[in-house]
Amino acid sequence: MNHMKRFFKYCLWTLGVLVALVAAFAWYVRSNDAAFEALGGDSIVIVAHAGGAIDGVEYTNSREAVERSLAAGCRYIELDLVPSVEGHLIAFHTNFDRPDTLYSSDPPSLAEFTGKKIWGRYTPLTIEDIDTLMRVHPEMILVVDKTDDPDLLDNYFASYRDRVMVECFSMERYIEVSKRGYRYALLNYQAFSLIATLKQDLKHLFNSDEPRVGAVVMNHKMYRDMLKDKINWLNRPVAAYVAHNADEVDSIAAAIPRCALIYSNEP
């Protein structure tokens, strides 16, 4: 009888320890990410989407759009960076509904890209042009979309890591970009899963060199329709796209409790 009592006491003790560990881990995975808490202070960071609109035209990724956004006081500039035919990084976003912005290939060659004005008016940006903008505007924070190869990024931004945020399209790229020391890595919703996030949190718990998953990037409708419960349970920050005006910025901010960034065409 005494053996049975000791056995049951041991089982209850073990169960209690397991419950406490699970509860502690649940608290840990829901704890706020300190880095993103400091990102915008008490305000949401507004990101100029594709450089921001210029003359009402969106998705230009152009010099004029970037300079307009910076002049308006927007520090965070998102650009779509893709390799040209030759492998040279350019700021380019495919727009199949805008035939006068299309080139003979997608992406275009460097010569065709630089030899043609966007919509006949706006100046295209090469990686050298972006480097110049970042030197002239030390307040500028670059948010990189499309390209998440850390080696390719290091070729151009190794000296700007503290001013570059990278949207990553796999957990492996997210981890590597974070470890390279870029300002923030952002995990695209396509690479986000509850299990993968919990596994990465567990790694970080036992090895602080392993990054935690911070902000998840998604369309604000995707948050509402598919990922709201998972994101809210994890208490992770959200980088939401895309707002077209100030009213939509306010609407998205009100709908997403942990919204940290909003990509806006009119920053």
Image: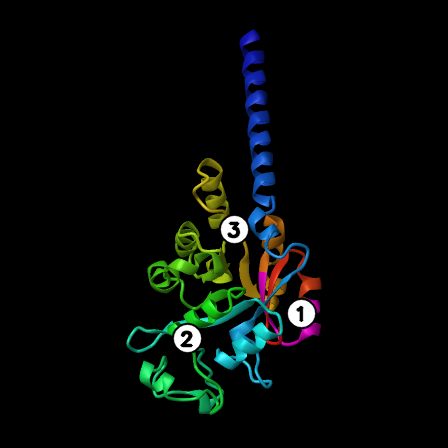
Q: Of the residues under marks 3 and 1, which one precedes in the sequence?
A: 3
Crowd band around label 3 with a 10 angstrom C-alpha radius: few (<14), some (14–19), many (20+):
few
In the rendering, at what x and y percent does residue 229 appear? 62, 54
Residue 33 visible in this rendered orientation of the protein? no
Q: Of the residues under marks 3 and 2, which one precedes in the sequence?
A: 2
Residue at the spot 28% in from the left edge and 76% down from the top edge: 86
The residue wearing badge 1 is: 249
Crowd band around label 2 with a 10 angstrom C-alpha radius: few (<14), some (14–19), many (20+):
some
In the rendering, at what x and y percent does residue 43 appear? 67, 59
Residue at the spot 67% in from the left edge and 57% down from the top edge: 257
Residue 83 visible in this rendered orientation of the protein? yes
| Residues shaded magenta | 239-251
The residue wearing badge 3 is: 194
Number of numbered discs overlaid on the protein picture: 3
Residue at the spot 52% in from the left edge and 51% down from the top edge: 194
Answer whether residue 242 is magenta in the image.
yes
